[in-house]
Amino acid sequence: MIPFPDISPEIFRIDLGGFSFALRWYALAYIVGLVAGWKLIARLVSTPRLWPAGAPMTPAQVESLLTWVILGVVLGGRLGFVVFYQPAYYMQNPGHILRVWEGGMSFHGGVIGVVLGTLWFAWREKLHWLRIMDYVVVVYPIGHFLGRLANFVNGEVWGRETTVPWGMIFPGGGEVVRHPSQLYQAGLEGLLLGLILSLLFWKSDARYKPGYLAGHFVLWMGAFRVVAETVREPDIGVYGLFGMTMGQTLCVPMILLGLYLIFS
């Protein structure tokens, strides 16, 4: 067993006259991921050699896109958690839906939110939606990697019981040695997925095929999540189809959609 690192989920806290503010690693992961993605996309669309026939959008439009991506991530992630994982609880306590500081965000809900936000942005700006999505998915792994590291620091969404030598006892997870599944997901869904998409973007003509990079994103993300769910502790009382976890069940349409976008 490897000891769980003693890292506070809070980077710092300020208490002034009854007012309290804390910056948490999880919030910082969101901020850094969104800002890094915005800056990288703006730089890519500003590189003329990448776009002999014209970039999919302007740097100014990228800045506007950021607003819709943020709304999609936050609203979609929260509502996805409410609908997919805890519908009964939130039907009885609707006022708790807005308590995002208590935790509870769904990756699949966030993806749906970003898709809808980007679709609205593309329609309003009269841009090609799939070309925009190709850029969003290329930078997405940055934020996902940081988010899974923040999950690990928070000691949440831990793995199943294990006997592997790198297992850990997580705070709140009982006296059980568990897989550090957050780190597995950071590696698979963050680093490896980011490498695959970067290679496709820079070493092939994928960026000229609308929807091709987006297709690879949902295909590989869905596949990696299915694998990670085999060692991740499932949510209590939440069940998927045919013996799968809810996370695995929600990945099936992602994989099918990815295959469609790649081969259509």
Image: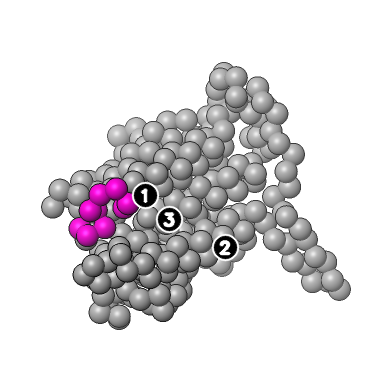
Specify whether residue 178 is in view: yes
Above or below, 139 against 159 in this view is below
Mark closer to the chain start, 2 or 3: 2
212 or 199, nearer to the observer = 199
Which comes sooner in the sequence, label 1 or label 2? 2
Residue 56: x percent and y percent? 28, 70
Q: Which mark is residue 140?
A: 3
Q: Which residue ends up furthest to the right in the rendered image?
A: 17
Q: Which residue is mark 2?
A: 31
* Spatial separation of the CA atoms under disc 1 and disc 3: 11 Å
What label does residue 198 carry, if any? 1
Q: Nearer the viewer, residue 250 or 121?
A: 121
Residue 61: which quarter of the image?
bottom left
* Nearest-to-viewer mark from 1 and 3: 1
- Report the residue at 26% width, 58% height from top: 207
Kindly check if marks 1 and 3 are in contact, taking CB atoms under 8 A apart as contact.
no
